[in-house]
């Protein structure tokens, strides 16, 4: 593979906002922009109008698309539900290249689609971020392969979500509710009430569609949020436990160590 075939990765990272933020490009993007909302919410220009973007929303923009992103203070309803301050976290990559043009044109692509974040392709995204942050010169070939793998992972995530929506739109609504409320305390009964089903039916349907219990999935979402804040924020471990919905540091410590085999403090050091 010649160097000329490598994609140009202009920017790649994880962004977490606790203050109002705005990014506007009215003249149109000059590259592809992929952005996955992982927590909190914001607003973005999608299909010609500003829309609310929530956890699990994947944004896909091509060169020439107008782009506007606003991270706003929470709505009154959010504050009443227990949300405090501004919270918006996302993975993003800005890139361009000939093979990206070919990949994009393989299928029709919506600017916004709800997906189930998968640790396999999220780990690729994280590896790409770390490669771009190397103090020594980055390896453009390795970065290119990581980007190719990420694009294929995004394709699979979109295809998987389509299957899940066809199987059970209600189960997808459950998952979306958990994604949006993971940082605050809620019960399985709250999830059931959100979709208008009994608790027993809610529990069974969620496990059938996603292969995890509601509690297991919620813990995974919260741990994913915690990992991102441990790596990329200056919050204390106690603050991370509180803002990721664990309620107490002792509970966070126990769940984290059971999942990763080390304490949160040891993970942060390494």
Image (cartoon, rainbow, N blue to C red):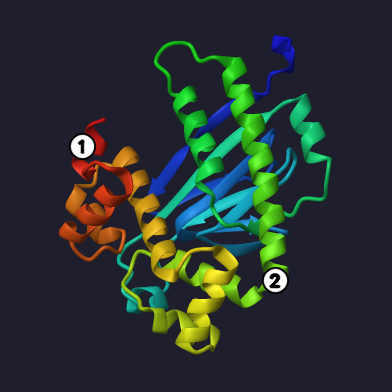
Residue at x-position 64% and y-position 51%? 157
Please determine whether, in this image, residue 229 is positioned above or below residue 193.
Answer: above
Residue at x-position 49% and y-position 49%? 22
Image quadrant occupied by the C terminus = top left
Where residue 43 appears, as percent x and y from the top left, is 54, 60
Residue at x-position 59% and y-position 28%? 146
Q: Earlier in the sequence, mark 1 or mark 2?
A: 2
Q: Is residue 36 visible?
A: yes
Residue at x-position 69% and y-position 19%? 6
Mark 1 residue element: helix
Local crowd size for mark 2, using a 10 Å CA cut-off: few (<14), some (14–19), many (≥20): few
Local crowd size for mark 1, using a 10 Å CA cut-off: few (<14), some (14–19), many (≥20): few
* Residue on which the image places disc 2: 167
Marks 1/2: CA–CA distance: 41 Å
Q: Nearer the viewer, residue 183 or 60?
A: 183
Hey, which quadrant is residue 81 in on the image? Answer: bottom left
Image quadrant occupied by the N terminus = top right
Where residue 95 appears, as percent x and y from the top left, is 64, 31
Q: Could you tell whether 193 is left or right of 87 in the image?
A: right
Mark 2 residue element: helix
Where residue 248 appears, as percent x and y from the top left, is 18, 63
Q: Could you tell whether 16 is left or right of 98 in the image?
A: left
Label disc, if present, on residue 157 of the rendered structure: none
* Residue on which the image places disc 1: 266
């Amino acid at each position: 593979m010649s160097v000329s075939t490598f994609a140009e990765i202009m920017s790649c990272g994880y962004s977490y906002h606790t203050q109002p933020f705005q990014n506007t490009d009215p003249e149109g993007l000059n590259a592809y922009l992929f952005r996955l909302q992982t927590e909190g919410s914001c607003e973005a220009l999608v299909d010609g109008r500003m829309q609310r973007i929530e956890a699990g929303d994947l944004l896909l923009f091509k060169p020439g698309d107008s782009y506007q992103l606003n991270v706003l203070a929470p709505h009154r309803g959010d504050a009443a539900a227990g949300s405090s301050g501004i919270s918006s976290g996302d993975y993003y990559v800005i890139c361009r290249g000939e093979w990206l043009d070919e990949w994009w044109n393989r299928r029709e692509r919506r600017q916004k689609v709800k997906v189930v974040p998968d640790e396999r392709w999220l780990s690729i995204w994280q590896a790409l971020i770390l490669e771009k942050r190397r103090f020594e010169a980055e390896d453009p070939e390795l970065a290119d392969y990581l980007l190719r793998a990420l694009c294929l992972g995004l394709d699979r995530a979109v295809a998987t979500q389509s299957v899940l929506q066809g199987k059970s739109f209600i189960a997808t609504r459950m998952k979306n509710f958990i994604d949006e409320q993971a940082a605050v305390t809620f019960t399985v009964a709250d999830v059931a009430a959100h979709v208008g089903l009994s608790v027993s039916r809610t529990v069974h349907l969620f496990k059938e569609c996603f292969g995890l219990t509601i509690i297991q999935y919620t813990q995974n979402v919260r741990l994913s949020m915690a990992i991102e804040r441990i790596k990329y924020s200056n919050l204390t471990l106690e603050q991370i436990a509180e803002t990721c919905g664990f309620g107490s540091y002792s509970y966070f410590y126990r769940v984290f160590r059971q999942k990763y085999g080390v304490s949160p403090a040891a993970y942060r050091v390494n």
